[in-house]
Structure formats: C-alpha cells, structure tokens
Amino acid sequence: MSDLDSQVAYWDAAAATKTFTHPVHLPWLDDVSRHAAILDYGCGYARTMAALEQQGFDSLAGVDTSPGMIARARALHPAMRFAVLDTPPTLADPDASVDVVLLFAVLTCIPGDDAQRQLVGEVGRVLKPGGLLYVSDLLLQEDERNRDRYARFAEHYGSYGVFETSDGAVCRHHPRDWFSSLLAGFDTVDTRHITVGTMNGHESAGIQLLARKPAA
C-alpha cells in the first residue's frame, strides 16, 4: 500500500483530536457469538471496539496503520489487544481465523482502487468461511461544496470523489456501485443508508454493508 493510501503522518498528527461517529448497527450482530473473533481493521482509538465490548463481545482485536492512533487506543483501553500495521494491508492473522472483520470509515481513507481491492482480498484471506465483513463508509455527496472539490481534485488524483481536506488528508467518497464491485467475492447480507458526522464536523450520506464470505 502506497504512502498516499496509508497517510500515516496525517493520522499520527490527528490521533489526539479526531472523533469518529459511524454507528454500529447492533441487530446485524445479534446472531454472532459473544466469543467470536472480531477484528477491527483501522480501529483508530477503539471507539467501535469499546461499543462491542459493552455488548459482551470478548474476543476483540484492533489494528491500525497509525502508531499514534494505537497509542491513544491503548491508553483508553489498556486491556484490549492492538497492533500497528507495518506493511498494510498485510495482517498477522492466519488464514480463515477471524469470524468478523470491521471496516469502519476505512475505505474513505484509501484513495486508490487497487489498494482497496488489496485490503478486501486480505480481509477475505483471514475470514473464516461464512465469516462476516461489516463495512461503514461514505458515498458521493450531492451538495455544492463536495461537488466542487470532487471536480477540483479529479484530474490530480485520477478519480472523481477523491479530494483533499482543509487539514491535509486525502479522502474518497464512493459511487454506490463501487461497493458492489469491490465486494463481488462476498455474498451481500444487508445494506443500510446512514447520515453520519464527518471527522471535520460536516454531515454526510453514508452506507453500511454486511457481507458474508462464501462457505465454500
């Protein structure tokens, strides 16, 4: 994964101040064992992991490319398991060893198509047959502010929907059909649309997808 697709320096600088808000739709996890192995890829400061722990899930692990984010997570939740990803998206987990993988506001931080595909491929490797992938991310927005910046940065990044934030991140908003293409190797279980606050204080249209790795 390239430096642009990981942006470690940005996330280290932002680690102490950013607040993430994508909600966990708990009914999607009703049938998941409270002892299931759950991996939060791009866990940040472990907000989502903490929410799951409160629901009784007891086998949680978080990974992130940002040492700063992992340091914050460890300070907030010293009993949880965390690791820094040195060569993303490569995971240390063995093949078919994880029951559920979370990708919460991760794809929006990865501008490149190939890098996103590599990540989803690695997730597929570590998931058990029948395991779940829970994605929460951002769609292309229809307001003028976003349309202007999509157009402004499209030529530079070679993709409509990739843009730079005012504080230096490179982010991506996605057309709906991109997720169908990206997750083509999974079986879609459910989809829901959400409105979510962004890390810089705006409201954006988002999407959540629950997908299952085929059993065979």
Image (cartoon, rainbow, N blue to C red):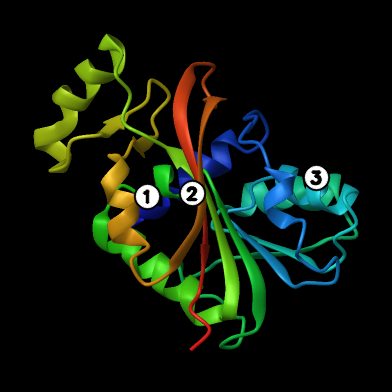
Q: Is residue 125 visible?
A: yes
Q: Indicate which label's residue lies in the foreground, 3 or 1.
A: 3
Q: Indicate which label's residue lies in the foreground, 3 or 2.
A: 3
Residue 187, how many percent across, how many down? 45, 67
Residue at 61% across, 36% down: 22
Give the Cα separation between the discs numbered 3 and 1.
Answer: 24 Å
* Label disc, if present, on residue 51 of the rendered structure: 3
Give the Cα separation between the discs numbered 3 and 2.
Answer: 18 Å
* Label disc, if present, on residue 110 of the rendered structure: 1
What is the secondary structure assignment of the residue under circle 1?
loop
Query: Crowdedness of circle 1 by 10 Å Cα count: few (<14), some, many (20+)?
Result: many
Quarter residue 164 falls in? top left
Compared to residue 88, the image places residue 94 above or below, namely below
Furthest toward the top, the residue is 144
Residue at 52% across, 52% down: 190
* Residue toward you, 166 or 48: 48
Mark 1 in CB contact with mark 2 (< 8 angstroms) = yes
The kind of residue tagged 1 is: Ile
Horizontal side, residue 147 vs residue 3: left or right: left
Q: Is residue 209 visible?
A: no
Looking at marks 3 and 1 on the same chain, the residue that comes earlier in the sequence is marked by 3
Residue 78, how many percent across, how many down? 88, 55
* Label disc, if present, on residue 106 of the rendered structure: 2
